[in-house]
Amino acid sequence: MTQARNYPLGDPILEVSNISLRFGGVKAITDTSFKVLAHEIRAIIGPNGAGKSSLLNCINGVYKPQEGSIAFKGQVLDRISPNIVARKGISRTFQNLALFKRMSVLDNILVGRQLHMAANFLEVACQLPRARREERENRARCEEIVEFLEIGDIRHTPVAKLPYGLQKKVELGRALATEADVLLLDEPMAGMNVEEKREMCRFILKVNDEIGTTMVLIEHDMGVVMDISDNVVVLDYGKVIAEGPPAEVRSNQAVIDAYLGVAID
Amino acid sequence: MSDKPIFMTFARSDVTNFVVLMIVAFAVIPLTVGSDYWYTSILIPWLCLALAAIGQQIVMGYTGQLALGAAGFMAAGAFACFNLELRVPGLPFAGSLLLSGVIAAAFGVLFGLPSLRVRGIYLMVATLASQFFIIWMIDKFGWFKNYDTSGIITAQDIEIFGRPFTSPVEMYLVVAVVVIVLTIPAINLTRGAVGRSWMAVRDMDIAAESMGISLLRTKLLAFAISAFYCGVAGALFAFTYLKSLEPVAFDIKLSFEILFMVILGGLGTINGAFIGAAFILLFPVVLNSLGNTYFHGMIDATIMSAIEQVVFGALIILFLIYEPLGMSKLWTNLRQRMFSRKRAGDARALRKPAG
């Protein structure tokens, strides 16, 4: 990661400031702050229940934190719903696959293009020129993504019929289709074998390198985290216990105690 | 691939189907079917109910909102059409129909609001409000019935370009034209971007929202368009089939029948609406005539009709167990088998999901 990148790390694009999230009496996140730089690959690690997924859910508006604020491109995202966050340029995948099960692979990815389509229902119903043009152009765009992810042969298969690893790929494809500036990936490699993980890493790095997408990903596999991330945030009991480049975080005593157990070296 | 669109979003098989349909609907049927019974008791109600079933299909099959109250929206459309014909001189019948649909759509938005808060069986209970409220409103305020006290109002004659359409064949032609003209945009919607956002909301609403889809707009649009189709269907049903307007005709039983049409026909398919409507409407007729032919005089008539209902219910249960995807799927499989020997390519087009 030392050679020159097409998109060197820039200014902070996403700023999480002092957010706290409670469910009744349970504190999921307590006073957490960190900044994600533009074009960065940021990993969030920590033991189960540390609040990692909750944090992503706060960023894209699924949960509304009781305290603190989240700013995207310098603009505070204050209590707005996921669809508006998506339109501003933050997309995501989910921990336990949230695909549209009865729709085909291509249709799933096309839903990711929905926010680039402006034709209203009358235009679609009557197939007026704008609706037809948008349909054609966005289909072509999705075909490129299908091509990129090497899933062309299953493009018309309903996703429910696909094995888990492929479904994960489709979900990445759907998130890519939005052309968001920031992608939140909630355990994109969970449950995959080594081969599939390697492939997924390749896609993530390639997207980051070729179009400069900022990635915030939750991952348990420390090998993967070491390989692909620029910086790591470590959460434990809803608090940030360490932050920095992977090598630094790995040798941090607090991280070893809370999460890693024994040092890898 | 043969499912590549050759005209707008339509594949070659769609265009062939359409041409065949037009020939059957406007040449074969009017020329060969002579008996009024077929028009007034089978074809007209079938097409009207299929149109309402398309409405139910949009909200339930495509958007996944368990709504029960199609007959309420049909009543709204029927009485809207009656009042438009009565009070707006010079408005063509097509205009009345369209506006009836728009008025029903407004009710659809209103009664779709609970879908933003509740789902599943709770939404079903909440949407029952449309059923009861609309019927109550029509009964309560005499204006809607033009202060008629007899309870049954005769529908006005349909006039198009000054020419009355009153014979069964003529009424059938009116219904067929309206149903075909409205089915095409329904297919366009469900195959296009709008349909994808409906299905996305149906399959995983939180993910749909995270992809930039507004749940509020998507759900309310589905309710509005669904009620539009039900409203037009209700107006046609009253003006061509019942030839009268009475709120009782649009009771909850009809809402349930439309619900069953959609489930049996196949959720999330437009042709399922037509197949389901045909099944629900025709099956009792078939059972009845079978019963009369084979058991005439042997069994008491009242017992016979009870047996018919039991058989009907049992068949529905069996069907749902063995083909939960509905008759549309059965039809697709059948066609696939027929074509697969000769033309494997066409079969692939038919297999296209959710078509």
Image (tube, coloured by chain):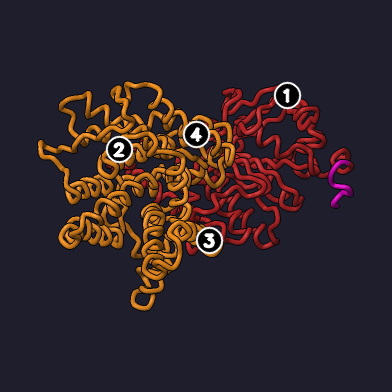
Chain colours: A red, B orange
Residue drawn at point x = 39 percent, y = 36 percent: B248
In 3D space, how far apart are the residues under numbered discs 3 and 4 (Cα atoms)?
41 Å
Please name which of the two marks, 3 or 4, marks the residue nearer to the observer. 3
- The answer to whether A210 appears left or right of A226 in the picture is left
Marks 1 and 2 close (CB-CB < 8 Å): no
- Tell me, yes or no, if residue B349 can be seen here: no
Amino acid type, label 1: Asn
Amino acid type, label 3: Ala
Depicted A163 relative to depicted A131: above or below? below
Give the letter of the chain under mark 3: B
Q: Are marks 3 and 1 on the same chain?
A: no
Q: How many marks?
A: 4
- Please give the range of residues in magenta: A258-265
In 3D space, how far apart are the residues under numbered discs 3 and 1 (Cα atoms)?
61 Å
Label 3: which secondary element: helix
Q: Which mark is residue A18?
A: 1
Query: How many neighbours does mark 2 have within 10 angstroms: few (below 14), some (14-19), or many (20 or more)?
Result: many
Q: Are marks 4 and 2 on the same chain?
A: yes
Marks 4 and 1 close (CB-CB < 8 Å): no
- The answer to whether B118 appears left or right of B336 in the picture is right
* Disc 4 target residue: B214
* Disc 2 target residue: B235
Query: How many neighbours does mark 1 have within 10 angstroms: few (below 14), some (14-19), or many (20 or more)?
Result: some
Rendered location of residue A144, percent (x, y)? 45, 53
Amino acid type, label 2: Ala
Rendered location of residue B171, percent (x, y)? 20, 46
Please name which of the two marks, 3 or 1, marks the residue nearer to the observer. 3
| Direction bottom: furthest residue | B341
* Disc 3 target residue: B314
Residue A149 on the magenta span = no
